[in-house]
Image: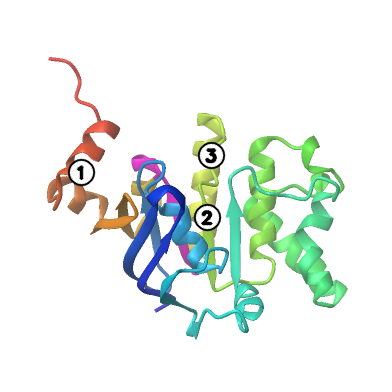
Amino acid sequence: MAARLVAVSKRFGAGGRVGPIDLDLARGSTTVLLGSSGSGKTTVLRFLNGLAVPDEGHVDVLGERLTEARLTEVRRRIGYVIQEGGLFPHLTVRQNVTLLARNLDRAEPAIEKRLRELSDLARVPAVLFDRLPHELSGGQRQRVALVRALMESPELLLLDEPLGALDPLVRRELREDLRSAVRELGITVVFVTHDLDEAAFFADEVVLLHEGRVIQRGTVESLEHRPVDPFVERFFRAQRPQAPA
């Protein structure tokens, strides 16, 4: 298993709660966390990189219990991409992408080689390397963020609605490139979205959350045709409304 959440739960103010959740993530698979806003998708993702600490239960990532003592080392094996990219605004594309590698004293030729390889993979032209994030389009920023997340050859890639802020044409092009890159690299991916079509495009398995709990998991087809809860049916009807008679 790439990761495992065991009886994980967390309480928030005003009675909010995520969990308890039990979830296994298979190595080399793409798991999509699907659900409406406030369902707990991003919190589950944050459990996996230690940005959220459960009140109960435990999290195992890449064969290690996620503890404060081991958090930094485990995080170096995880790539993380958020909506809008999360690039440092005062650093150029090259500086953003290579920051961690330089802090870890990687050899300069190796850094440059990795930068070129990933830029080709994510279709980031070299002409952008010396630009600042505000000089890039939204799609370009997301491509750069993907390159940055992959620089240290992560075993686990976490994607938190990375396509959510893009216009439809850019979104369609980028999602095709993203899926191709993930398949070529063969890494484990956890992808958060509220978009059913996006989930169907990427997922080996979908995990549908509602009010902080896992309602159903499986393929998109199995959830649509064999729902185990009325919410599953409502979710699919809302995303795929019937044409008027």
Report the residue marked by disc 2: 159
- Amino acid of disc 1: Phe
Q: Is residue 218 visible?
A: no
Which corner quadrant of the image does residue 37 belong to? top left
Which sits earlier in the primary sequence, circle 3 or circle 1? Answer: 3
Which corner quadrant of the image does residue 95 belong to? bottom right
Residue 180 at x, y = what percent?
50, 55
- Amino acid of disc 3: Glu
Query: Nearer the observer, disc 3 or disc 1?
Result: 1
Alpha-carbon span between mark 3 and mark 1: 31 Å
Residue 225 at x, y = what percent?
14, 47
Q: Give the extent of the magenta segment.
A: 186-198
Q: Residues within 10 Å of mark 2 (few under 14, many from 20)?
A: many
Point 78% across, 71% down: residue? 101
Point 59% across, 50% down: residue? 82
Question: Residue 15: within the magenta?
Answer: no
Q: Secondary structure at mark 1?
A: helix
Query: Nearer the observer, disc 2 or disc 3?
Result: 2
Q: Secondary structure at mark 3?
A: helix
Q: Is residue 81 visible?
A: yes
Report the residue marked by disc 1: 231
